[in-house]
Image: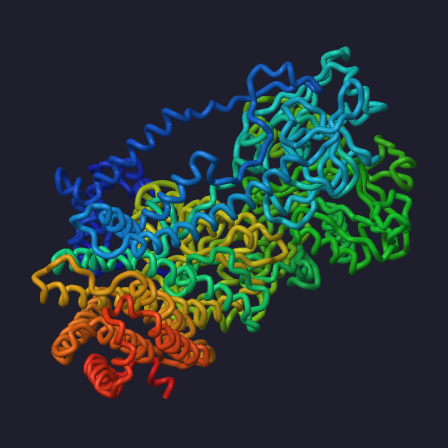
């Protein structure tokens, strides 16, 4: 679609004139575009000219007869605030934050990380002091616990406000009532908070202590000694048993496995459940015994600690041999902390400890998603309530000082009710039988599920099942592709179709990193052991382990067609044919897959014999073959010319298949020996090793014979299509962020209905500089209502120069697909959406590469999938299937937000109505500092008399769950924030003032003769009014609501016998049983509540809300 739309549409004579002006502009800037087509991007580095050429960011610009580069009505750069305006509008926060950051940097100067030389078994030879190998996940220490907890609590204005009010009661002139009516609620809230934080902190301390106290065997000159994990130092030789966690980053020296390699599980490090193969240093593996490690003089040179868990550069040197032995070390020779040994026993030398390990450096500090500053997630509902509290405070200051002193009572009550409500919402979510296995890990933000506007999702394992099914490969002259005959100028013997298919299948069976694992039946000890090469290869317990499920799918396919991988070690692999013959191949070199190269390769030699110990090689006759497979983008320039690869890749990508191109090259002995010498020399380099190794390997990647094209299908999860359609109808914009290729990501977006089939897709062309990004963004600006597909590289360039424009354009799209995204790019996209749109974002993923994205979003959802539980553990909510997100948002998110909005405003109303009554009472007595209600009346009013009915609002619902799912459009109204706004808040304020005035003035007018009973009369009417207001607010009755209403009323009636001290007369019990008391209290209550019931009835009749139409 994008190829068919020109960047410069023709508009008759005006457009031609614009074209001439554009040509003149190019001519003035440099060489004309006529001589060289590249002149179109001549200005890519002319930043001054590009700054004068804003992007087309307004619709009127397209009607302008000027070129794309002329200034349009809307300027790209907004006016910046200066001077006092900047300081008042937030500059003071920036200055304070900058000063605090400077002080922290001064007090905690980070030590510069450097490369190191580590001698085997000699920690004392370390030149620098390294951090302790201890794990610390605690947020506080003994000295910072109390100040830290108090600071987190009093960041909220309402809590700080009530603290000030409580402290003001120590001043005699401001004292009203008893001190405990102020300090008891505040103390209760703080005690609950401190106790909760203390329990969480103690649990973290116990987990840290358990991890740091784990015992490991340390190899010394005197033998093995047991040491704690926290006592391990750089240079120690540590022995790690099977199924034991690796305590620190180590270089792999020896293993009990005869092959010199072992498997480790990395699911707690990178989220991948596939086992990784690690290789021991050959020099130390060949030593006869463990004790010989101390009889040699050897050291490891390791690069400085860094974040990348997928790369490592170092060297191993043995000095006491003649000549000295040098071995290069790479990622396959490392054992990172937090991984688990899956086979055998390993011995390694520690190179990084504590906070310098890869796992700690890749772990971000947990964020408190309740309160905080700019770097901390804040629940939107908490922010809105905080703003309303500030508005209420200002209104009350204007109204009366007396009202201010008493309204503060709503502060801790509001916080307690909201926290209890959130806990109840979390319990309801986890007990929902329709979404089994759902876990609420952050109980402080369930309302965020009801305010989401953007959903950013991973693809593999989230929208898809991460279960790879290999389709039949497509190849030249194969049955699955049209027959194409090769043309050649020299006579050659043409290969038959069967021989080509045989070559392709053999290449797929050899070019991979899969290892077969045999699990014997549990013996006496019940342990599973790995068999040697002479085990029965037809064992049904054989499983495959690899770093990618795609690899396993390919090997399983070759097994299904008769060529089975039965054994593999570091030096050889064996294949079994359908006739039972075992073919042995010696592995000469292995080139693993990297995200930069997008391909992997292997060099093998045909061997004779059976098994490692009986293999013989005749180097003069044995054939050496270099097999390679990779993405079509990387392989298209490597393989020989062909006319079908691009077409077949496109066909497979449109079917949603992940494609790999397989090729080979036959090497002579001289060619291989020359390559091996250059390759070994490049691997020993300590500077730019990666580039040098890649350059040597690329010397082989020339004119390779194309064998076949494979396609692996990743099937969609159940009910993905209806779930995405439901979310789209709910007004949620969905962005898919994936590391997969553009064609596959686009196909999955279509097949999952993320992009409807009638919707246009704009594929953002690859850009590499500012000029290209400028032109492509202008082209994209012309599109309307189309989905955007952009690659990570192009995204990086656009964000560097045109961040605001790109985000604004992308937010107007119904769907966005970002392919080839790194984990950091995913998190960056989430952060940009939050900052530019100020809307609530949700990120959902299932792998370790999604953790950063999940933690950066306002609401993170993790799926327990095949890539481990790392994303699930790091998320705020954990689900088992993607389709559960529909009910989680439409039902629980919607209910949580509406319930909390009603609960928060009602608690404010409860505090404001009694403040109004106090104001009226004080005004009658010339604003004397006399409290209307004292002692237990104030405490009881906010607790046992009204707490149960008010809290029962957490059970209210406007529509049934089935209706909310059937009509997801109801969710769209929530994003507008109408349930909790200044308008609804003002309505509740007016209701409170009206009812408070009616209750107090009514009590004073109707009870002139019995003025001593004013307190009893007004307080009784107040309790009845609150109970009736709860009934007025409820939309769907629950049996517990009825119980709460009558329970509170019963508690008040039962307590009347003990309240004579507060009601001012010992004979008040006889008075409240009279008919006069009953009818006058009833009259006041009816006047305060009946008009509101009438207004509610008229509103539902004249302007019913959307949910009421569905309910009826």
User: Which residue shows up at 82% across the image and 34% down it?
Assistant: 256
Looking at the image, residue 874 sits to the left or right of residue 404; the answer is right
Query: Residue 996's quadrant in the figure?
Result: bottom left
Residue, far left: 926
Looking at the image, residue 712 sits to the left or right of residue 64; the answer is right
- Name the quarter where the C terminus is drawn: bottom left
**Closer to the camera in the image, 10 or 207:** 207
Residue 840 drawn at (x, y percent): 36, 58
Q: Is residue 134 above or below residue 1012?
A: above
Looking at the image, residue 317 sits to the left or right of residue 871; the answer is right
User: Which residue shows up at 42% across the image and 24% down it?
Assistant: 109
Residue 1105 drawn at (x, y percent): 29, 80
Q: Is residue 902 above or below residue 137?
A: below
Structure colour scheme: rainbow
**Closer to the camera in the image, 879 or 74:** 879
**Closer to the camera in the image, 347 or 594:** 347
Count how many numbered circles sit on residues in the image.
0
Q: Is residue 107 above or below residue 324?
A: below
Query: Residue 1050's quadrant in the figure?
Result: bottom left
Residue 104 drawn at (x, y percent): 37, 29
Residue 991 drawn at (x, y percent): 20, 73
Can residue 492 be seen in the rendering of this structure?
yes
Can residue 490 be seen in the rendering of this structure?
no
- Name the quarter where the N terminus is drawn: bottom left
Looking at the image, residue 320 sits to the left or right of residue 444; the answer is right
């Amino acid at each position: 679609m994008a190829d068919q739309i020109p960047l410069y549409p023709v508009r008759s004579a005006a457009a031609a004139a614009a074209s001439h002006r554009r040509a003149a502009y190019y001519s003035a800037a440099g060489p004309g575009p006529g001589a060289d087509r590249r002149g179109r991007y001549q200005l890519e580095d002319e930043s001054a000219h590009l700054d004068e050429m804003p992007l087309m960011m307004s619709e009127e610009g397209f009607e302008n007869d000027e070129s794309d580069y002329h200034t349009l009505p809307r300027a790209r750069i907004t006016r910046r605030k200066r001077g006092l305006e900047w300081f008042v509008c937030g500059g003071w926060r920036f200055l304070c934050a900058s000063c605090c950051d400077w002080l922290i940097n001064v007090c905690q100067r980070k030590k510069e990380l450097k490369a190191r030389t580590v001698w085997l078994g000699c920690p004392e030879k370390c030149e620098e002091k390294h951090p302790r190998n201890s794990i610390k996940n605690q947020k506080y220490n003994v000295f910072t616990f109390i100040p830290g907890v108090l600071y987190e609590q009093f960041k909220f204005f309402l809590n700080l406000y009530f603290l000030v009010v409580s402290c003001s009661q120590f001043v005699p002139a401001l004292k009203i009532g008893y001190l405990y009516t102020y300090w008891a609620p505040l103390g209760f809230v703080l005690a609950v908070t401190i106790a909760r934080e203390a329990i969480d902190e103690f649990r973290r301390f116990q987990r840290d202590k358990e991890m740091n106290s784990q015992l490991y065997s340390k190899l010394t000159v005197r033998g093995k000694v047991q040491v704690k994990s926290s006592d391990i130092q750089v240079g120690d030789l540590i022995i790690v048993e099977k199924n034991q966690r690796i305590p620190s980053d180590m270089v792999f020296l020896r293993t009990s496995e005869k092959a010199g390699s072992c498997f480790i599980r990395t699911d707690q490090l990178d989220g991948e459940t596939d086992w990784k193969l690690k290789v021991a240093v050959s020099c130390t593996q060949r030593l006869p015994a463990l004790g010989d490690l101390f009889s040699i003089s050897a050291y490891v040179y390791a690069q400085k600690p860094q974040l990348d868990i997928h790369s490592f550069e170092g060297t191993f040197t043995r000095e006491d041999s003649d000549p000295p032995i040098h071995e290069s070390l790479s990622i396959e020779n490392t054992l990172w902390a937090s991984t688990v040994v899956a086979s055998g026993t390993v011995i390694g030398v520690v190179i990084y400890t504590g906070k310098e390990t890869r796992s700690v450096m890749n772990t971000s500090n947990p964020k408190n998603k309740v309160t905080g500053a700019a770097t901390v997630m804040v629940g939107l509902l908490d922010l809105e309530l905080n703003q309303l509290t500030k508005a209420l405070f200002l209104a009350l200051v204007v109204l009366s000082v007396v009202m201010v002193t008493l309204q503060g009572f709503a502060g801790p009550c509001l916080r307690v009710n909201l926290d209890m409500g959130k806990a109840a919402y979390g319990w309801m979510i986890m007990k929902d039988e329709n979404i089994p296995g759902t876990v609420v890990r952050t109980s402080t933000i369930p309302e965020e599920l009801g305010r989401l506007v953007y959903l950013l999702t991973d693809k593999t394992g989230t929208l898809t099942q991460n279960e790879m099914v290999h389709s039949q490969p497509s190849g030249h002259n194969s049955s699955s592709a049209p027959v194409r005959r090769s043309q050649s100028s020299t006579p050659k013997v043409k290969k038959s179709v069967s021989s080509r298919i045989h070559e392709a299948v053999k290449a797929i069976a050899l070019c991979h990193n899969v290892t077969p694992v045999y699990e014997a039946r549990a013996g006496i000890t019940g342990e599973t052991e790995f068999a040697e090469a002479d085990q029965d290869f037809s064992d049904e317990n054989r499983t495959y382990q690899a770093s990618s499920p795609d690899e396993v799918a390919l090997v399983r396919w070759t097994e299904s067609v008769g060529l089975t991988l039965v054994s593999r070690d570091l030096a050889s692999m064996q294949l079994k044919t359908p006739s039972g013959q075992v073919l042995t191949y010696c592995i000469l070199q292995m080139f693993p897959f990297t995200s930069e190269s997008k391909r992997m390769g292997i060099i093998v030699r045909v061997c004779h014999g059976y098994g490692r110990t009986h293999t013989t090689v005749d180097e003069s006759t044995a054939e050496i073959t270099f097999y390679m497979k990779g993405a079509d983008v990387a392989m298209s320039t490597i393989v020989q010319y062909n006319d079908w690869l691009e077409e077949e890749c496109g066909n497979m990508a449109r079917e949603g298949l992940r494609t790999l191109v397989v090729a080979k090259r036959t090497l002579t002995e001289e060619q291989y020996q020359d390559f091996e010498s250059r390759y070994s020399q490049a691997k020993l380099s300590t500077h730019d090793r990666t580039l040098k190794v890649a350059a040597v390997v690329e010397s082989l990647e020339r004119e390779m014979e194309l064998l076949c094209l494979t396609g692996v299908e990743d099937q969609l999860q159940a009910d993905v299509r209806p779930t995405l359609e439901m979310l789209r109808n709910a007004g949620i914009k969905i962005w898919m962020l994936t590391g997969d290729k553009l064609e596959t990501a686009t196909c999955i977006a279509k097949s999952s209905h993320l992009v409807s089939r009638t919707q246009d897709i704009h594929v953002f062309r690859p850009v590499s500089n500012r000029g290209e990004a400028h032109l492509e963004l202008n082209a994209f600006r012309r599109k309307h209502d189309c989905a955007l597909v952009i690659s990570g590289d192009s995204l990086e360039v656009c964000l560097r120069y045109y961040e605001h424009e790109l985000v604004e354009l992308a937010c107007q799209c119904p769907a966005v697909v970002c392919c080839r995204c790194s984990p950091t790019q995913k998190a960056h996209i989430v952060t940009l959406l939050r900052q530019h749109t100020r809307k609530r974002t949700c990120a959902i993923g299932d792998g370790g590469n999604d953790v950063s994205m999940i933690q950066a979003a306002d609401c993170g959802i993790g799926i327990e999938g095949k890539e481990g539980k790392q994303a699930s553990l790091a998320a705020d909510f954990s689900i088992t299937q993607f389709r559960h997100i529909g009910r989680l948002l439409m039902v629980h998110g919607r209910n949580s937000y509406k319930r909390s909005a009603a609960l928060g405003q009602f608690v404010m109303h409860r505090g404001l109505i009694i403040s109004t009554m106090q104001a009226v009472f004080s005004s009658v007595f010339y604003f004397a500092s006399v409290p209307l209600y004292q002692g237990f009346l104030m405490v009881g009013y906010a607790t046992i008399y009204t707490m149960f009915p008010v809290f029962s609002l957490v059970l209210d619902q406007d529509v049934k769950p089935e209706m909310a799912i059937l009509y997801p459009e109801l969710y769209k109204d929530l994003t507008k924030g109408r349930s909790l706004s200044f308008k609804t808040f003002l309505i509740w304020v007016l209701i409170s003032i009206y009812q408070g005035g009616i209750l107090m003035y009514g009590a004073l007018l109707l009870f002139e003769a019995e003025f001593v009973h004013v307190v009893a009369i007004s307080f009784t009417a107040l309790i009845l009014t609150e109970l009736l207001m709860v009934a007025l607010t409820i939309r769907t009755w629950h049996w517990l609501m009825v119980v709460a209403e009558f329970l509170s009323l019963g508690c008040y009636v039962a307590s009347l016998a003990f309240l004579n001290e507060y009601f001012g007369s010992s004979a008040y019990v006889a008075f409240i049983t009279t008919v006069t008391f009953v009818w006058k209290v009833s009259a006041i209550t009816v006047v305060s509540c009946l008009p509101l019931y009438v207004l509610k009835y008229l509103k539902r009749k004249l302007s019913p809300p959307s949910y009421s139409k569905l309910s009826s």
